[in-house]
Image (spheres, grey):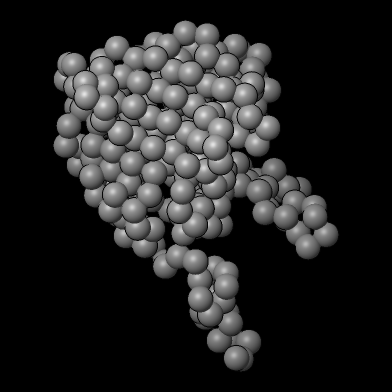
Amino acid sequence: MKIDDVRRTAYSMPLTSPSFPPGPYRFFNREYFVIAYRTDPEALAAVVPEPLEITEPIVKYEFIRMPDSTGFGDYTETGQVIPVRLNGEEGVYTHAMYLDDDAPIAGGRELWGFPKKRATPKIEVESDVLVGTLHYGSVLCASGTMGYKHRPVDHDIVVKGMQAPNFILKIIPHVDGSPRICELVRFHLEDIVLKEAWTGPAALGLFPHALADVARRLPVREVLSATHFKADLTLGLGTVAFDYLAK
């Protein structure tokens, strides 16, 4: 293979059999179960990187079911996002993510810098309760429950939240182990078609684990609200909002 061939075809590893195809990536019937909770302000200050600003001591714990996505297939994801502000614009910062599919783990980390790790999240309806869980191996790390479709939610409010900018800290090391890329990446969800949105009484339990640390860093002090909604959307590619290595 010639040098020009490498330059022309390279976008991911392995070179001749990448783990995911080029985007854009469209998701159909993407299902969200989101529980907002209050945590300790000092806990947020310890994990949210500048120049992002914390708006209030709130975390959103998300369970997301993706049954049909171009390039990435069928998988489930869970994690914590934090409301933040950058240059006066409000958005969310993705703190941690756990999922059960190699292609979106590789693509998410390489393209955007999503903090993805392999684990086993689930969303299920058990009689009259919506249940979200995260297991790392055999160990339960998170458990969320909500009364199933108790009350409808205003679609405009949900879509407005989905349209807010998302921020991620992308880190790629050099061959000597030092950071070669260290950037705050910004991206949006695009072409959103919201199909339904609901709320109900909710509870959330986070449990200690050495490698899936959803509990210790951002503890639950009070559950504030929960939403359950489904949408079609496109995961937009990112831009660099801040370069930590710039001179």
Rendered residue at 56%/41% (across/down): 137
Left/right of residue 172 with respect to residue 125 in the rendered view = right
Is residue 134 something that shows in the picture? yes
Number of numbered discs = 0
Q: Position of residue 82 (x, y in %)?
A: 50, 26
Q: Position of residue 105 (x, y in %)?
A: 51, 53
In this rendering, the answer to whether 41 lies above or below 186 is above
Residue 125 position by quadrant: top left
Rendered residue at 29%/49% (across/down): 67
Q: Nearer the viewer, residue 86 or 156?
A: 156
Rendered residue at 49%/27% (across/down): 142
Q: Farthest residue in the top direction?
A: 222
Left/right of residue 246 with respect to residue 205 in the rendered view = right
Q: Position of residue 131 (x, y in %)?
A: 34, 27
Quarter of the picture containing the N terminus is bottom right
Is residue 148 something that shows in the picture? no
Q: Position of residue 217 (x, y in %)?
A: 64, 22
Q: Farthest residue in the bottom direction?
A: 2
In this rendering, the answer to whether 199 lies above or below 4 is above
In this rendering, the answer to whether 144 lies above or below 106 is above
Q: Nearer the viewer, residue 160 or 218?
A: 218
Left/right of residue 110 with respect to residue 152 in the rendered view = right
In this rendering, the answer to whether 14 lies above or below 92 is below
Rendered residue at 80%/55% (across/down): 177
Q: Nearer the viewer, residue 208 or 216?
A: 208
Q: Farthest residue in the front direction?
A: 138
